[in-house]
Image (tube, rainbow, N blue to C red):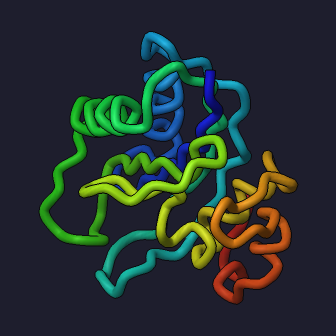
Amino acid sequence: MSVAYIGLGSNMGDKVANLEKAVLELGKVPGNKVLTVSSIYKTEPVGGVEQDCFVNAVAEVQTSLTPRELLNKLLYIEKNLGRVRDVRWGPRVIDLDILLYDDLVMDEEGLSIPHPYLHKRGFVLVPLAEIAPKVIHPKLKKGMSELMNGIHDNKNIEKI
């Protein structure tokens, strides 16, 4: 069994309910067990597209799935919850990303682990550091709390 950290985000509809549904669906996937879920945080959008604020969280998931299988399940959950991919970094009902998968480092088409923006985004690092402060970024060799303390975009992140 492996441990993966999944980033969750929503900025359309009932945002908190969208995250809760996604966590429930993650736990229903054969081979997955949700171990921990962070608090939910209200965050400002990133990427330059005018849109509503997000709610974000991170789930720790024990899984027997390979990274590619897990990604496919996440994409399936997104689609079932109403995600439509039309504008890059635009509004979304749900967004699910593999942030970390054990201490794996991989870069394949459509799948990079650790997530390439993990160490730059407060909306990911704040909830990740809450539940896994000592987990080490496999490329940067720094803990999540240390990475979180080194970023500057976490000022507008508030726990809800």
On the rendered structure, is 12 left or right of 15? Answer: left
Q: Position of residue 21 (x, y in %)?
A: 46, 29
Q: Quadrant of the N terminus?
A: top right
Whether 62 is drawn above or below 100: the answer is above
How many dots with numbers? 0
| Residue 155 in view | yes
Q: Quadrant of the C terminus?
A: bottom right
Q: Is 74 or 138 nearer to us in this picture?
A: 138
Q: Quadrant of residue 122?
A: bottom right
Q: Residue at x 66, y 36 (%)?
A: 60
Q: Position of residue 104 (x, y in %)?
A: 57, 48
Q: Residue at x 25, y 57 (%)?
A: 109
Whether 35 is drawn above or below 81: the answer is above
Q: Position of residue 121 (x, y in %)?
A: 58, 74
Q: Is 124 or 136 nearer to us in this picture?
A: 136
Whether 48 is drawn above or below 116: the answer is below
On the rendered structure, is 23 left or right of 18? Answer: right
On the rendered structure, is 86 left or right of 36? Answer: left
On the rendered structure, is 133 left or right of 104? Answer: right
Q: Quadrant of residue 134?
A: bottom right
| Residue 160 in view | no
Q: Position of residue 159 (x, y in %)?
A: 74, 59
Whether 54 is drawn above or below 101: the answer is below
Q: Residue at x 32, y 49 (%)?
A: 93
Q: Is 134 or 26 nearer to us in this picture?
A: 134
Q: Residue at x 24, y 45 (%)?
A: 83
| Residue that lies at the very extreme toward the left in this rendered image | 86
